[in-house]
Image: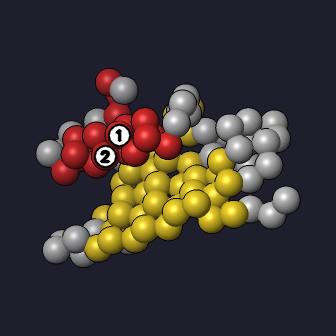
Amino acid sequence: MKAKLLTHRKERNADGHIMELKAWIVPVTECTPHGLKYSAVYIVNGVRAIGYDNERGKGDHRHYAGVEKPYTFTSMAQLLTDFNADVTRYLEGDDNESDL
């Protein structure tokens, strides 16, 4: 089975920051036990400020202000909620990942 695109959205806000979401339906494997390959990213001045993805070999993880940590994926809806909450925190000036 080939990967099937589930969604792809890319937006640029008034400040020029980019928010992009990509998700594919893929075969269930050890690397993709939920059958999804995804990437959600918020880019500020060409640099990833926030990111959630499941890169092969790393599994589900998130990036926040330069820090990478494992992420427990439960659903696309929850991932979007968590991603949007991180973007809001970042925009409010909380770029300290240590309390997450």
Above-or-below relation of 24 to 30: below
Using a 10 Å C-alpha cutoff, classify the residue at mark 1 as few (fewer than 14 neighbours), some (14 to 19) or many (20 or more): few
- SS at badge 1: helix
* Residue at 39%, 51% in the rendered image: 50
Above-or-below relation of 82 to 18: above
Farthest right residue?
A: 1
Q: Amino acid at mark 1?
A: Thr
Colour style of the rendered protein structure: secondary structure
| Residue 27: image location, x then y, percent | 80, 49
**Residue at the spot of label 1:** 81
**Residue at the spot of label 2:** 84
| Residue 64: image location, x then y, percent | 39, 44
Using a 10 Å C-alpha cutoff, classify the residue at mark 2 as few (fewer than 14 neighbours), some (14 to 19) or many (20 or more): some
- SS at badge 2: helix
From the viewer's perspective, tell me whether residue 94 is left or right of residue 18: left
Q: Amino acid at mark 2?
A: Asn
From the viewer's perspective, tell me whether residue 1 is left or right of residue 6: right
Looking at the rendered image, the quarter that the C terminus falls into is top left
Please state which of residues 42 and 79 is positioned toward the viewer in this rendering.
Answer: 79
* Residue at 37%, 59% in the rendered image: 42
Farthest top residue?
A: 99
From the viewer's perspective, tell me whether residue 37 is left or right of residue 57: left
Report whether residue 97 is seen.
Answer: yes
Looking at the rendered image, the quarter that the N terminus falls into is bottom right
| Residue 41: image location, x then y, percent | 43, 57
* Residue at 43%, 36% in the rendered image: 78
Report whether residue 58 is seen.
Answer: no
The tally of labels here is: 2
| Residue 60: image location, x then y, percent | 61, 39
- In space, the residues marked 2 and 1 are separated at their CA atoms by 5 Å
Please state which of residues 34 and 83 is positioned toward the viewer in this rendering.
Answer: 34
Cβ atoms under marks 2 and 1 closer than 8 Å: yes
